[in-house]
Image (cartoon, rainbow, N blue to C red):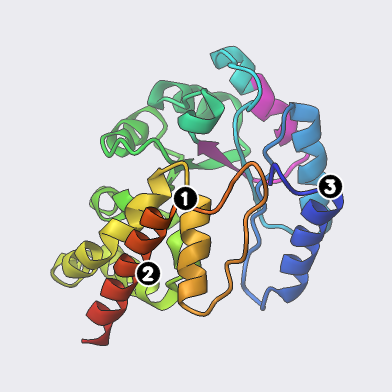
Amino acid sequence: YQVLTADERAKMVEVAAQAAPKGFHVVPGVGAYGADEAARWTEQAAKNGAAAVMLLPPNAYRANNDEVVAHYKRVAKVGVPIIAYNNPFDTKVDLTPALVGQIAEEVPEVIAIKEFSGDVRRIWQIKKSAPRIDVIVGADDVLLELSTAGVSGWIAGFPNALPAESAALYNAAIAGDYKSAAPMYAALHDLFHWDSQKEFIQAIKLAMDLLGRYGGPTRLPRLPLPAADQEKITREVAAVKEYFKK
């Protein structure tokens, strides 16, 4: 979203809302440099019928806990349910289990968290410190591990390239059918691990292109992946296709 114009970002939400079939919920990301801007994007999402929004903490300032809570309170005034988004790698602000507990107490509009820290212990800690908050898988390569604790969803990257395979894995994991889920996860995991790398956008787009779904080019500052990485992803996509042919 950082490299979209304001018009493009608004249009993305409008098109998604118009295309969504009955019963399908559109949940736009409303992360922004400041809370007022994030609130404006939340208002735009609400105007287009969004069921909820996904909100990063402040992403241009290393906020302390009270400032993070104030940020969420400001956006919550719009009146739309909020999924907090923990991405400490990009924002440099970590929504720790203790901070999630504080947010849960002070901002009732926050109903869930997309957990992207990669620490599979976090889900147990969040369930203890903020039991009312739903935990949503945020990184593709910890899906199976987090599913053992009970999750409420998966905000995902590589299902853009492999929707049917990813759905089969998710449904098996959520059902506790690990006999089926584990080998699927093993087949997908090398590819999924790109979702936790800074090049994840290039990797997902390339996988989509390889599978005929059109990922397309990235915008600066992201350049195409080096040839060695492109070859690696090509091999990993081929291996996944071969596994799911069985």
From mark 3 to mark 1, how far is it between C-alphas? 23 Å
For residue 59, say whether it is visible.
yes
From mark 2 to mark 3, how far is it between C-alphas? 31 Å
Which residue is labeled 3 in the image?
6
Please identify the residue farthest to the bottom as the structure is shown.
246
Which residue is labeled 1 in the image?
200
Which residue is labeled 2 in the image?
166
Q: Is residue 73 magenta?
A: yes
Instruction: Return the residue nearer the eye: 14 or 236.
Output: 236
List x then y, in percent, for residue 12.
75, 60
Task: Please indicate whether residue 16 sits to the left or right of residue 200 in the image.
Answer: right
Image vertical order of residue 220 relative to residue 121, above or below: below
Query: Reading the chain from its start, which is encountered first: label 2 or label 1?
Result: 2
Please identify the residue farthest to the front as the structure is shown.
227
Query: Reading the chain from its start, which is encountered first: label 3 or label 1?
Result: 3
Answer few, some or many: residues within 10 Å of disc 3's Cα (few below 14, many 20 plus, some between 14 and 19): few
Count of numbered circles in the view: 3
List x then y, in percent, for residue 41.
78, 44
Which residue corresponds to the image point at 23% horizontal and 69% vertical from the top-left? 184
Q: Amino acid at mark 2?
A: Ser
- State which mark lies toward you, 2 or 1: 1
Instruction: Return the residue nearer the eye: 53 or 111.
Output: 53
List x then y, in percent, for residue 192.
35, 57
* Quadrant in which the C terminus appears: bottom left
Query: Reading the chain from its start, which is encountered first: label 2 or label 3?
Result: 3
Secondary element at image label 1: helix
Instruction: Return the residue nearer the eye: 98 or 10.
Output: 10
Q: Amino acid at mark 1?
A: Phe
Secondary element at image label 3: helix
